[in-house]
């Protein structure tokens, strides 16, 4: 099998950049709302990459924002070709401290952060009673926080933990049985646009953008808090590729796909 040439890689990268520009053009411009929100993040950093600007805009206005992390971050160097000189427990502590620092930068204090500590990269392994317990835990948090908006990863966001977070939260919302706006934020699917085929097929219906210029530097500072993901750990290996990071550096907008108001319709009717 032939490997992509450097030229092909460069062309692919710029095609993806052009597609991101198309998403910005197609998204309907809205402002960050005045509604209290809960951000559900599969990993420590997803909240900042996906909706750090919206978090900062809300907090500037004193609007309550809670952040819930589903996994513990122990596999933050997954894919490293060499042994990583950090134990799993150290990774967990490091990722939590990075998350608290990033959120403090965005205006969210530690009292408004929840770490559920399911095993990183294993959300898809939750079955039967374990899965029902996780859904019940999320339902209890929704009942406790009573948000008017919920933010989750895009339902086809490439990484299995991102996809499972969507479906776990979807089931928790259905059990909670309250009226809430559900917004999907883009992480890996922003970088790899082939995961947005359905969005394209639907002519970008329900795609929205929020201008984040007033808090753009805050978001960049929050991203920098995740040093474990930005700096080489062994040799030249980085947890997040430079090309991935370039899709979020100085981005003027954040993109969201809104779920239909009746969350039992459309995508929300699909079960895992």
Image (spheres, rainbow, N blue to C red):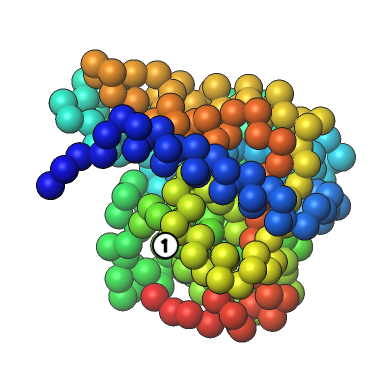
Q: Can you name the residue that lies furthest to the top here?
A: 235
Q: Position of residue 49 (x, y in %)?
A: 57, 39
User: Which residue is at a point 28% across and 24% down the rendered structure image?
Assistant: 237
Q: Position of residue 214 (x, y in %)?
A: 81, 30
Q: Is residue 58 above or below residue 30?
A: above
Q: Is residue 231 above or below residue 132?
A: above
Dividing the picture into quadrants, the one containing residue 174 is: bottom right
User: Which residue is at a point 45% across and 59% down the rendered structure image?
Assistant: 195
Provide the secondary structure element on which disc 1 rests. Answer: helix
User: Which residue is at a point 41% across and 41% down the rendered structure image?
Assistant: 12
Dividing the picture into quadrants, the one containing residue 203 is: bottom right
Q: Is residue 263 above or below residue 183?
A: below
Q: How many discs mark residues in the rendered view?
A: 1
Residue beneath disc 1:
164
Nearer to the camera, 211 or 167: 211
Q: Is residue 222 left or right of residue 86?
A: right
Q: Is residue 248 visible?
A: yes
């Amino acid at each position: 099998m032939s490997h992509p040439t450097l030229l092909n890689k460069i062309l692919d990268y710029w095609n993806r950049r052009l597609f991101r520009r198309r998403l910005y053009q197609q998204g309907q411009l809205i402002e960050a709302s005045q509604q209290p929100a809960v951000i559900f993040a599969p990993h420590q950093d997803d909240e900042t990459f996906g909706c750090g600007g919206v978090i900062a805009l809300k907090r500037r206005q004193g609007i309550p924002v809670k952040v819930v992390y589903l996994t513990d971050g122990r596999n933050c160097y997954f894919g490293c070709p060499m042994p990583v000189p950090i134990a799993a427990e150290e990774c967990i502590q490091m990722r939590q401290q990075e998350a608290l620092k990033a959120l403090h930068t965005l205006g969210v204090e530690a009292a408004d952060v929840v770490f559920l500590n399911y095993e990183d990269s294993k959300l898809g392994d939750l079955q039967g009673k374990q899965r029902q317990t996780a859904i019940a835990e999320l339902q209890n948090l929704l009942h406790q926080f009573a948000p008017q908006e919920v933010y989750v990863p895009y339902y086809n966001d490439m990484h299995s933990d991102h996809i499972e977070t969507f479906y776990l939260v979807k089931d928790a919302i259905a059990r909670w049985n309250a009226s809430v706006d559900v917004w999907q934020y883009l992480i890996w699917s922003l970088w790899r646009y082939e995961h947005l085929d359905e969005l394209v097929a639907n002519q970008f219906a329900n795609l929205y953008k929020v201008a984040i210029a007033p808090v753009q530097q805050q978001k960049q500072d929050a991203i920098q808090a995740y040093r474990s993901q930005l700096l080489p750990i062994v040799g030249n290996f980085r947890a997040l590729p430079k090309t991935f990071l370039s899709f979020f550096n100085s981005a003027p907008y954040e993109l969201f796909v809104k779920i239909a108001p009746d969350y039992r319709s459309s995508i929300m009717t699909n079960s895992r």
